[in-house]
Amino acid sequence: MDSHPKLWPATFLRRYKRFFADLIDSEGNIITVHCPNTGSMKNCLEPNSCCWYSLSSNPKRKLKGTLELVTTKYGALAGVNTARANNLVRTALDTKLIAELSAYDVLKSEVPYGKEKSRIDFLLQDTSGEIPDCYLEVKNVTLDEGNGMAMFPDSVTARGTKHLRELIFMAEEGFRSVLFFCVQLSDAKSFSIASNIDPVYAGTINDALDKGIEIIAWRTLITSDSIALQMPIDVTLDTLDQKTR
């Protein structure tokens, strides 16, 4: 379980300049908090919807508050603090929650890899040497398309495409490469790639699948008190635009 710091309820007004969000706190004051999400936050920016923020005790921070949870266009809770995704996956790996990855006994983070000067989120190793090293890249998902469908990305992601190329390279070198989508949406039932938003990323996903890259998606359990990986959800890549195949 990855517990939040104390969360404070508020009403969402707007997000602007990527890193700022205006909220109305419980006393009716308009406050500005940090928005820790650099994506488009499509379907997550609903004026006058319920949201929650945390407060920092760091005296050097100009903005004491951080936007943590919002309500999507379709009524789901979305965890918009992208920094939490790796912590959630790390906890799940430490507790052997993810069956496909439970055989590894060594876990390293931010290890240099590939040929484009990247760092992998997690490198999993087996000290017995019976299984190949696993390069695990984590992506945070907040794009709610309704009816339980979660998608990624919510905007063009050159960085995400670069990470796919790196995973492909490692797979070609004989290692295991896994792309893990941490779906921070409370009602997600299935996951797919938003090829209409970034066809280049979708095309690279197809190349990755052809090279043996594994794709895993898990939904989180979100409340106003805590957030944790809950369960795997279906990955439905048949919705990709055929032009990307």
Image (cartoon, helix red, strand yellow):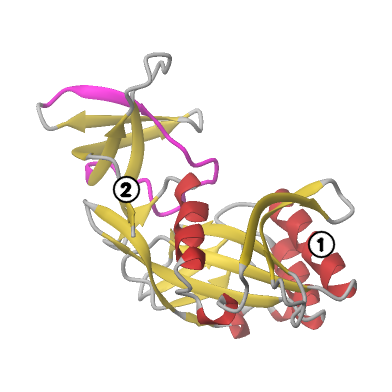
The quadrant of the picture occupied by the C terminus is: bottom right
Tell me: 148 left or right of 155: left
Q: Position of residue 27 (x, y in %)?
A: 9, 27
Vertical position of residue 158 compared to residue 141: above or below: above
Q: Residue at x 50, y 76 (%)?
A: 98
The quadrant of the picture occupied by the N terminus is: bottom left
Q: CA distance from mark 2 to mark 1?
A: 31 Å
Residue in front for this viewpoint, 92 or 116: 92
Report if the CB atoms under discs 2 and 1 are less than 8 Å apart: no
Q: Quadrant of residue 127?
A: bottom right
Question: Pointer 1: what residue?
Answer: 165
Residue in front for this viewpoint, 234 or 3: 3
Kind of residue sitting beneath label 2? Leu
Tell me: 95 left or right of 155: left
Q: Position of residue 181 (x, y in %)?
A: 54, 66
Magenta residue span: 28-49
The main secondary structure of the magenta stretch is: loop
Q: Quadrant of residue 60?
A: top left
Q: Judge the density around disc 1: few (<14), some (14-19), many (≥20) Cα neighbours within 10 Å.
A: some
Q: Secondary structure at mark 1?
A: helix
Q: Is residue 212 magenta?
A: no
| Label 2 or label 1, whichever comes before in sequence order | 2
Kind of residue sitting beneath label 1? Arg
Question: Pointer 2: what residue?
Answer: 69
Q: Residue at x 84, y 46 (%)?
A: 117
Q: Secondary structure at mark 2?
A: strand
Tell me if residue 203 can be seen. yes
Q: Judge the density around disc 2: few (<14), some (14-19), many (≥20) Cα neighbours within 10 Å.
A: many
